[in-house]
Amino acid sequence: MRERQYRKLIPRLILLAAASLAPWSSARSLAMPLPATDSPLHKVIVIGFVGGFVRHDDAKHAEVQFAARLRDRYASAVDVKVFGNHSGQEALRHVLRLLDTNRDGILTALETEKAKIIIFGHSWGGTETVLLARALQRQHIPVLLTIQVDSISKPGQGDISIPTNVAHAVNFYQSNGLLHGRPEILAIDPERTNIIGNFHMTYKDHPVNCDQFPWFARTFTKPHIEIENDPRVWAEAASLIDAELSGARSIAQAH
């Protein structure tokens, strides 16, 4: 079922990569909300990573804004938290703590099998997205979806190979400026991980307003912050999360 949902999304994602989608509106991403649930075993855990040396709560950054929209959209059905990209161990501890529903300090097979985890990140946060997925793999914990936005490798830490515990992964990147993202991610095992796509974004004819950022960022790394603030990217991320959490029905209602 989920594979069919993703196949329906591919034509729109191809259009996005060609920079021909209309601007994002809140009605487009906020579909019918899921029924709220207070059961920890049924909650979806969403982890976001900001780029560079950005504070995890800096509301000028799109990752923080996106997390807030997810909280509003899904209410108590999700647990959403954003971390700095140097706080991967803290993020891992947070996930393990949420999965340990009986608080005995030991994860059972039931607790790990029921895990529903989505991870996203921009720039160095894209690398941290993959690193967290790998750390969860070592704990035999599955990941529903990873989303990398202009992912930039940290020294000695690759962001290309998506581990086998990830069901679906998508990569949005741009190729201009001093900082530009990873053009391709690959599944270690294509039989277990579906790479939804590597989507090239361009801003020559579709500039994104970045006036809230410092002049040096707008001067030297503008495309890198344009993709971070591109509403089309986050609209597609929202659609992919809808596909995981609420099925094709909510995606159709969002248009």
Image (cartoon, helix red, strand yellow):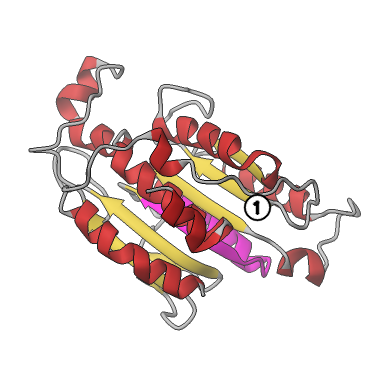
Indicate the quadrant where residue 246 lies.
bottom right
The residue pinned by badge 1 equals: 44
Q: In terms of depth relative to the viewer, which is nearer, 74 or 125?
A: 74
Taking the spot 37% from the left edge, 60% from the top edge, the residue there is 170
- Above/below status of 3 relative to 216: below
Residue at horizontal 15 percent and vertical 45 percent from the top: 202
User: Badge 1 local density, few (<14 within 10 Å), some, or many (20+)?
Assistant: many
Q: Position of residue 74 (x, y in %)?
A: 61, 43
Q: Is residue 161 above or below residue 221?
A: below
Residue 103 location, x and y as percent?
89, 50
Helix, strand, or loop for circle 1? strand
Report the span colored magenta: 128-148
Magenta stretch encompasses residue 147: yes
Instruction: Work out whether 149 lies above or below 24.
Output: below
Horizontally, residue 247 falls left or right of residue 179, namely right
Foreground residue among 40 and 160: 40
Residue at point 47%, 36% (across, down): 66
Q: Amino acid at mark 1?
A: Val
Quadrant of the image occupied by residue 159: bottom left
